[in-house]
Image (cartoon, coloured by chain):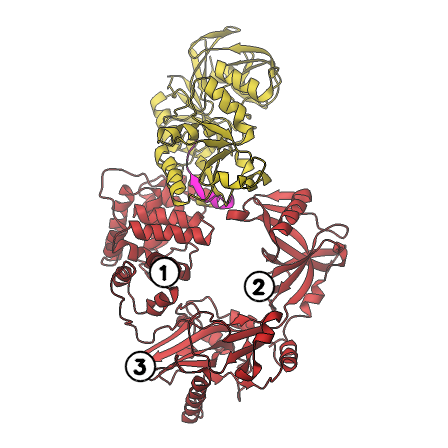
Chain colours: A red, B yellow
Amino acid sequence: MIRFAGLLDRLIFTPGRNAKVRILTDYFREAPDPERGWAVAAITRDLDIKTIKAGQIKQLVYTRVDGALFDMSHDYVGDLAEAAALIWPEKPGQNYVPTLTDAVETLNGVTRTEALEVVERWFDALDASGRWALIKLATGGLRIGVAARLVKVALAEYGGKPVQEIEELWHGLKPPYLSLFSWLEGGEKPASAAAAPFRPVMLSHPIEEADKPKIDLAEMSAEWKWDGIRVQAVREGDERRVYSRTGDDIGGAFPDILAAMPFDAAIDGELLVFDPHVRDRFAVRPFNDLQQRLNRKTVSQKMMKSHPAFIRAYDLLWLEGEDLRPLPFEERRARLEGLLLREHRASPDGDERFDLSEVVDLPDWDALATARANPPLDAIEGVMLKRRSSVYVPGRPKGEWWKWKREPFLVDAVMMYAQRGHGKRSSYYSDYTFGVWKDAENGRELVPVGKAYHGFTDEELRKIDKYVRDNTIARYGPVRSVRADEDKGLVLEIAFEGLGRSTRHKSGVAMRFPRVSRLRWDKPSREADTIETLEAMLPEEA
Amino acid sequence: MKPEALLHPTPAGLYCPPGDFYIDPVRPVDRAVVTHGHADHARSGHGAVLATPETLEIMATRYGEDFTERRQSAEIGEVVNLNGVALWLVPAGHVLGSAQAVVEHKGTRMVVTGDYKRRRDPTCAGFEPVPCDVLISEATFGLPVFRHPDTAGEVAKLLHSLEQFPERAHLVGAYALGKAQRIIRHLREQGYDETIYIHGAMQRLCDLYERLGVPLGPLAPATVKDGRGAKQDFEGKVVVCPPSAMGSTWARRFPDPVIAFASGWMRVRQRAKQKGVELPLIVSDHADWDELTDTVREVDPHQLWVTHGREDALVRWAEVEGRVARPLHLIGYEDEND
């Protein structure tokens, strides 16, 4: 438990991705089986113990500590688990110090009442970090800002294997992952055990001007690039899954899709939300509507009615026991069309949740450019080109698939606050909150509309940092308020991919992927854009 | 005599009317007794300053030789008569030269701890408990969540990180007086004998510590020499700097630094997060909760007065213990500094 707690402490405070990977691989090297496997499961949240409720921890602390002192401490620290872990009067040397393995194996096999007694004994033996980790583990509240994907990258790095191989195996593996670690350390590769496994995704390259002469359009097939999230829907017998493009199982949030998978197949496609009032076809809603359904573990009936999801199919990877990935794209595509047609015929009135991403006839660069600039729907974010002969391979093979996204939206905004970055940027003000003008009682005021922390060069960052330091009007911890009024302010040209309505932001809008596209040192702050300009960019209302 | 007549809080600091002196005054006064050299306790511009020889040297180093009109050096244990009031200094274990002030008059003895700690510090003499009628204690970490772990274990975290990230500079934020030298001493004790780089603001205090008999091993200024590749000179090195320098432009000379911070406040995760600290080192020059309460029990005064910090919790604890306790609410001490 002490070693695991030390790992969590390092991961929580370390901002750099590479540094996190190194901390994880060093841990895998040091920790024995099955502890390291349990640690992986705890971090990827594949381990849900939840034997104890937070309230019980509080009651437990009250039995050992003056309640008034605990309340003062809880107030000061903020987090209950942390306050409890810190205040517990430990008795070092009096008890056996549990390992993570002890904790997991014991807590999984006891009742709630027993669990509390065990935890109380362990509290005496552990240090504050260990108690904190134990509370988070036992109450199911372990969130440390490390994505499952990063753990898989670290595992791949540890074993010198491609991360795709780990993603492909992942859903057939169970904690504590003994067979996985054995393979990573030179043993035999575990057999792919899962039904309906994830198949690592094939990705495309963005088209730059210089790429165009290299692309022979006669060999390519064009489709719209839909603005949803890339998913893989897989059914094999009774096993049904929806995976994100990094192999996370997101099916729990999409029971409407899971219920409408009549085939034994693995379909690569775009997850989108449709307008429930349009019955004869899927009328695709903008990304903001899909956003409502993302990052949830479960979904309400109401949400499924108002924001029904479907998958627009791009590709067919596996069908009724046959791996189609070695086939050329056009053959896979023909099989996909046949499958969807068959299922459609089989259920004329059924609740279908799959359709086909149509092939668009865009024979030359002019036609492509026009389609890209003026797509027929808000939910289209560009065009895709796929070589008809391309086999399906994980990653981004050169020259096979291309994406040509529409130009980003642009707006001129004024920097309002700047925050110091992390890691390499910890001495630079590198995260900027920017605003646009809005009419107020006494003239105009800036209303914040977003935050950006990339898009500039190191040289530009040095200049902005100096500007922030020279024009600070107030400081709040790591944040500086920068002078921004009609007469003075730094105008940033902000590029972003889309705009949605938001009740959580004062401005009422939220940007997707905002970044600084240009520094407008030349532009007077009063000439920056207004909130009306932004509102005009919102997609039409449902 | 009543203790309030011997020492009581005023806006300028704790005042002793019969002796006509202040202890750690926050404003310029005629006669000051200074417990230790930290800026919020030791200010310049007093008529006279009584302190240990080390504290007087520290003040002269920080403020210049004319920091006061008259210096009065008092060795540890040397009883000084101030207008009939007996005063002597006893080690507090906080930083080099730090002392508790013992004030005795007409059969009443009061002890002002100043800032103190109980655990071992290789750079200064350890705290000595003095029996008394009234103990006036600090309470910077006066909440039971503050239990500073073993210092060697925290320093080992730094050494482990140096092994794990040999290509990154390790920037250790530490207060320039006391904490910086203590961290350096602990590193030396744990076998680290490479050159340690220090921020310019620490040079004179480190020199003073060396001169006063605290060996710090090879130190070098953390300056970039002219020419190329200088940045790489700091790969895998320890650089000690004041906390304020960690987020300054000065910090940019180092390759992808690991930001470490040695402070008792690092016990609370949110504090470390807010400051952008990657490697929190819980090392404090103040007593933690157990040290505070153990000291009160050991000294066992008739009354406990609590000065700066989280007075309420310590007073609450004392009352539950059946002790007479009151908060003094002294102002002007920056309890963020540790």
Asked if one can make out residue A238 in the rendered structure from this viewpoint, the answer is yes
Q: Chain of mark 1?
A: A
Which residue position is annotated with label 1? A156
Q: Secondary structure at mark 1?
A: helix
Q: Earlier in the sequence, mark 1 or mark 3?
A: 1
At which x and y percent is residue A404?
58, 73
- Of the numbered discs 1 and 2, the one sitting upstream in the chain is 1
Q: Counting residues from the N terminus, which is met first, the one under dot 2 or under dot 3?
A: 3
Q: Amino acid at mark 2?
A: Phe
Q: Are marks 1 and 2 in contact (CB under 8 Å)?
A: no
Q: Amino acid at mark 3?
A: Gly
Image mark 2: chain: A
Disc sitting over residue A237 in the figure: 3
Q: Residues within 10 Å of mark 2 (few under 14, many from 20)?
A: some
Gap between marks 1 and 2 measured at Cα:
29 Å
Task: Tell me the mark number nearer the camera, choosing from 1 and 2.
Answer: 1
Which residue lies at the image location 42% right of the left edge and 71% below the top edge?
A394
**Would you place residue A369 above or below residue A441 in this image?**
below
Name the element at disc 3. Answer: loop
Q: Would you identify the image quadrant in which residue A347 lies?
A: bottom left
Tag 1 and tag 2 share a subunit: yes
> Badge 3 local density, few (<14 within 10 Å), some, or many (20+)?
few
Dot 2 falls on a residue whose secondary structure is: loop
Residues tagged 1 and 3 counted as in contact (Cβ below 8 A): no
Asked whether residue A57 is in view, the answer is: no
Q: Which mark is residue A513?
A: 2
